[in-house]
Amino acid sequence: MAVRLRSVRDQVRELLNDVDPSDPVWAGPRLDQAIAGAYLALRALLPAHKLLTASAFTISASAQTFTLPATVTNWIGGDGGAEYRSDLTITLVSTGQQLIKLSNAEMDAMWNGVPATAQPLGIPRYFALSEGRDQGVNGRCYPASKASEACNLYAAIEADDLRNYVGSGGTSTLDDVEVEMSRVGVYALVLRSASDQVKKASAETCDKLGLDKAVWREWRKDSNTMLLAEAGRKHGLESSGRTQRWVN
C-alpha cells in the first residue's frame, strides 16, 4: 500500500501536539524535509521493493554489453530515476532462460584472451554488472549475443527521494507524493520523524507543546521496533519455502 505524504505530515503534527493551524511550530516544508530524510533512512534498512519490467532492455546482436534502464515508473510523482540493489534477475524473452549472475572478476576470466574480432556468439548465459558514478548500471554477458535479445528485468529498486517530485502540483507542495510503506512502516516513519524534531527542539519549544523532551528516545525505540516487525514481515513473505528447498 501507499499513503500520501500529507497524511504522514498530519500524523507527525498530531504526535508533536503541533495542531494549531494558525500558529504552527514547524512549517510544512520543514516537516516535509524531515519526513523525506527519515523515509530514505528507514527504507535503506528494509528489503527493497521489487519490480518486474517486461522487455526492459535489449542486448543488441553481436554485443557483449548492455545497460539497465535508467528510469523506472515506480510511484506517483516520482522522477523515475532508478537505483538498483544487487538482488535482480534477467530473463531472455525469446527462450525464458534466466541468466546466471557472475562477479566482474569471473566475467573477466570468461573473456580473458578472447580478441574482439573473434568473440564467441550465441545465446547469452552469464552476466555481470557494474555501477557508474551517475548510478547508471552497465552489464556484460557471455557469450556475446548472436541475435538481438529482449530481456525481462525483475529488480530490487532503491527508495526514491520524496523531494524529487515532478507531478502536476509542481514542486511547491508534496501533499500528493506517495510514501510507499505498509501501515506498520508508515507508523515507524511517523515516530522517527517526530523523534528527530523533538531531539533538535529547544526546551522552550517542548514546553510550549506540552512535550517531555526526553520522549524522543521512546519514540525512536518504538520506531525501531516497528521497523524490525516490518522487515520480518517482508523477509517472511519472500523466503517462505526456501529453507526446505535449499538447506538440506
Image (cartoon, rainbow, N blue to C red):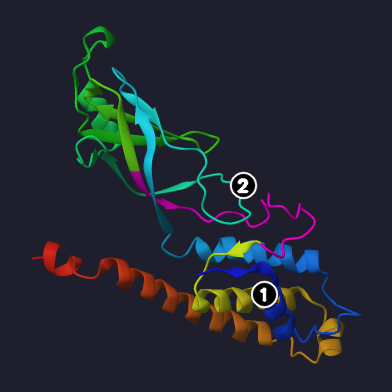
Circle 1 sits in a helix, a strand or a loop, which is it?
A: helix
Left or right for 46, reference 199: left
Q: Which residue is mark 2?
A: 79
Q: Position of residue 159 (x, y in %)?
A: 53, 56
The first of marks 2 and 1 along the sequence is 1
Q: Which residues are magenta?
A: 153-176
Left or right for 43, reference 176: left
Classify the position of the C terminus by image quarter: bottom left
Q: Position of residue 66 (x, y in %)?
A: 38, 28
Say which quarter of the image contains residue 56.
Answer: top left
Say which quarter of the image contains residue 145.
Answer: top left
Q: Circle 1: is it few (<14), some (14-19), or many (20+) Cα within 10 Å? A: some
Label 1 is placed on what type of residue?
Answer: Ser
Residue drawn at point x = 48 percent, y = 81 percent? 225
Q: Which residue is mark 1?
A: 7
Residue drawn at point x = 31 percent, y = 73 percent? 236
Q: Which mark is residue 15?
A: none
